[in-house]
Image: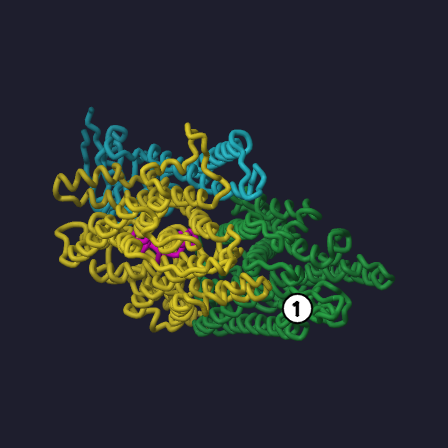
Chain colours: A yellow, B cyan, C green
Amino acid sequence: MFVSPIREPLITGNKDYHQITEDIARPTEGRPQIGWIIGMGIAQVALLLGVFMMLWTIWYGIGTWNLNRTVGWGWDITNFVWWIGIGHAGTLISAILLLFRQKWRTGVNRAAEAMTIFAVLCAALYPGIHMGRLWVPFYIFPYPNTRAVWPNFDSPLLWDVFAISTYFTVSLLFWYIGLIPDLATLRDRAKSTLRKNIYKALSFGWRGSAKQWQRFESISLVLAGLATPLVLSVHTIVSFDFATSVIPGWHTTIFPPYFVAGAIFSGFAMVLTLMIITRKILHLEDYITIGHIESMNKVIILTGSIVGIAYTTELFVAWYSGNIYEQYAFLNRAMGPYAWAYWIMMTCNVFSPQLMWIKKLRRNLVATFILSIIINIGMWFERFVIIVTSLHRDFLPSSWTYYVPTFVEVGIFIGTLGIFFTLFLLFARTFPVIAIAEVKSIWRTSSNQAIEKFQQQEEAEAAAEKETATV
Amino acid sequence: MATKKYLLGIFDDEITLMKAVKGVRAAGTKIYDVYTPFPVHGLDDAMGLRHTRLHTAGFLFGATGVLLMFLYITWINTVNYPIIVGGKPYFALPAYIPVLFEITVLSASVGMVIAYFVRNGLSPIRQEPPLDSRATDHKFVVAFDAEELSGEMDNVKELLAEHGASEINEKEID
Amino acid sequence: MNMSEHFQFTSGQKRNAFILMGIGALTLVIGIIMALSGNHTMQEKIWTGILTNNMFFLGLSLAGLFFIAVNYIGYGGWYVTVKRIPEAMSMFIPYMGVGMLVILIGLWAHWHHIYHWAAEGIADPNSPNYDRLIAGKVSYLNKPFFTIRIIAYFAIWTFFAYSLRRLSIQEDQLGGVSQYNKSKVLAAVFLIFFGITSSSMSWDFVMSIDSHWYSTLFGWYTFSTLFVSGIAAIILFTIFLKSKGYLPQVNQEHLHDLGKFMFAFSVFWAYLWFSQFMLIWYANIGEATAYFKARLDHYPFLFYMILVINFVVPFFALMTRNSKRQMGTLATIAVIVLIGHWFDYFLMIIPGATGNEASFGIFEIGLTIGYAGLFLFVVLKELTKTSLVAAKHPFFKESLEHHT
């Protein structure tokens, strides 16, 4: 197969198959580094804080979140949507980039998919703790029961239940199926019996036979084909939580694709944050190259611009509609009591990603890292602005209010960050953070040796053509 | 369990492997299996493997799941406990679409994954050991059933060596 | 393999295109005669027919340009063997500029009343035509600004279409990567303009017809319509050329990918259709539901037919791998998709422009045939101007060896 040599190599450093195994498997073997231990420590502190705050909430009630009329949803739903959005990058990288045959996905898909699962877990915590009775969560599922009640199929909140359960399940299955061959690699390298037995069980007896790989490719393709509309549907259904209402600023038809674009935007930003750190600490720069970083930054420009166009569209149509409530909602966002949040959102989401048009910045690690954090802050504010500004001043001015979070909510949010990083650090120690088998499968066409070979091939052909032309 | 004997041809890259597989098949020898560290494009065709029908299974699982769920929701909302919600009719099809879509994806995925594990013989407990543990690292292994080869063993060894095998081993598994 | 192969537009093919255009012209002339003799229905049919076909064929041309631009910035290599087709399609944009000019002239001369906001005195409280809601947006919806916008759209789009085309032709002659690099930049800038103008043009041409209605999704919804139609058109042109013995380098792999695009974007279109419909249905707010009520009450058959043709049929027909590798299946579904999306535009336009008694008949068929004839003529003529194969494109070799 031919790959044009104007493409950048996706694997650098003159690797061979064995070296690829070595480089990626090594971080899971041996002792944890000091950096990992410190990171784990901080994450644990945050996690414990969160657990404590969640118990506090369950004990004392949702009043500890300062939620009341008319702001019934505050930091809780903001964080819920923020986490789900972040999760979208993983599935997008695995599924959609697979369907578009973008080979660069192989450097980052494993970690991104893991990030999805952890992010969805953090998100799912919120409906869990704010639905009222955390100890009977199964009530939300439609099984025949003696209470003579069914869940409300007409409600987007129930659609959420199905969407997030499905998303979590399918992402987990997709991620794990891809992991199995790599876990078999770890199994076959394991020195101690305990380690070997653990990976034996985890790798499900994978042998790498041709028939197994054939089914593996088939299921990967079909799951990718299913996961793509799934990714679109999940954040769409989350957007339905708002768009099906009649609240100005919430009831707008653009929400589904706009939320999806925003989710991809924030998800890729989080992947960049994690990957820039991971590649440095685990010495994986040859597999997560600057080219990978640049490609992800291009997705950021694209989705950031889509988000920007969506903002502009909403503003224009609010004016165009002639609906005085809709018009006020947007005026209030830009100039009302929460204007500070609105302008943080605009700066972070609309103006800053446009910096990535500059190639030098796209390929700069520090700039990318800072921008990725800014984007996630901006996307947090986007959800906050949508939720709180529309709720705190809707139709009846006598009900207008101003919402501030409590230490309980902030603590829970920090707790979810703790849970996320705990899981991610555990993942980095026990599973290969890059898809070993997939990277090997692109070596033949996309390693630096391969690109050099194609370059020589093209030059030879060009020279031969010149010869026959002059003859 | 009786011991099984295998003849293994070890190769260092997938291109040599593909040529060898084609050559061996052309000579009419039956390959037991081929083990590779990553999926090799075209290998299943070269080995004459039948295409998998996993995607068909997926479609059937999805179709079944969505049909059942559709009937269930309709029964719940129109027969068992009809409630007027938001002024909508009892049978509010647009509202069911998101749930039905998710169930389609869920049933298709879960069904296919179970089928995948069953068909690939993947289990955390009942496992056959790999014939050469380097097949998950950097070696490409062509395996023959030694009993089926019987007298042909030396011919096959020659064939493998001709096609660039870096090692030719015999292996016994209990 | 002949790298400098040119398409020969045979006189027989030209004659066929002229016959199609002739049918359209004849239909139009008969319609105009009927309208001038006082047939009001026919008068409305003429103008809405022109607008519908303008939108549909403009959509196809823009889709060609968009497809090329998106592949430049996405480093897509597989499509290069069919690149000349969307390029040729994009050359039709200025022709639809003329089509929209006709609508503009009709607007200023009050020959049609498609756009209620253009009525005299719409913003004057003392006028019997006064409409408070429209008066609120008359700073955007007024004839001069509308005209300026339309001129700007076509100027911008034509500029980018011609620039990318010119670079592509230069690349054929000079080789190297210089044109490729310039094209990448042009493509990126075009996409910024396209992101804005594709939405605003649909607000201008179509959404403003239902002057009391609005939907923030409308711009992206019409984009999905135009894009999937464009893919269907690319497929049909590819299959046509192959059936005449051209493009031997285009094989099942390329068709498979085009088929995947048609499948995926049919699903995407359905997703946007559903989002728009369901959200308006769910909140049940009168000023938004009026749009769908008008269509469901008076054109229910068309309403559901559009959903079936544009989603159900392509979804089931193109699901299997094999279906996307057979030219017969792809061509059939492409034709169905094109017809389905033509009706998509039709149903967007006629209820607001003509009221509840509009019909689809011989006039619409004739006029559309005429437009199709013109489109085919212009695109095929463009295809003769360069080699059919963009052999000097840096990704050409990749495209040749493309394997799905």
Q: Where is residue C223 in the image (x, y as percent from the top left)?
A: 56, 59
Q: Residue at x 48, y 64 (%)?
A: A311
**In the rendered image, is residue C330 in sight?**
no
**In the rendered image, is residue A447 in sight?**
yes
Write down the chain letter for disc 1.
Answer: C
Q: Position of residue C367 (x, y in %)?
A: 74, 58
- Mark 1 — residue? C135
Q: Looking at the image, is B135 positioned above or below residue B144?
A: below
Determine the secondary structure under disc 1. Answer: helix
Residue C320 magenta: no
Q: Residue at x 63, y 51 (%)?
A: C292
Front residue of this view, candidates B159 and C382 = C382
Residue A110 magenta: yes
Q: Looking at the image, is A183 positioned above or below residue C363?
A: above
Q: Position of residue B86 (x, y in %)?
A: 55, 44
Q: Which residue is drawn at 39% across and 66% down?
A: A341
Q: Residues within 10 Å of mark 1 (few under 14, many from 20)?
A: some
The answer to whether residue A247 is left or right of residue C351 is left
Kindly indicate the quadrant of the structure image that contains residue C64.
bottom right
Number of numbered labels in the structure image: 1
Query: Which residue is the extreme one toward the front?
Result: A398
Q: Residue at x 71, y 70 (%)?
A: C125
Q: Position of residue B142 (x, y in %)?
A: 27, 40
Kindly indicate the quadrant of the structure image that contains residue A388.
bottom left
Query: Which residue is the extreme one toward the right?
Result: C37
Q: At label 1, which amino acid type do we have?
A: Ala
For the record, the magenta segment spans A96-112
Front residue of this view, candidates B23 and B73 = B73
Front residue of this view, candidates A122 and C365 = A122
Q: Looking at the image, is A196 positioned above or below residue C392?
A: above
The answer to whether residue C332 is left or right of residue A266 is right
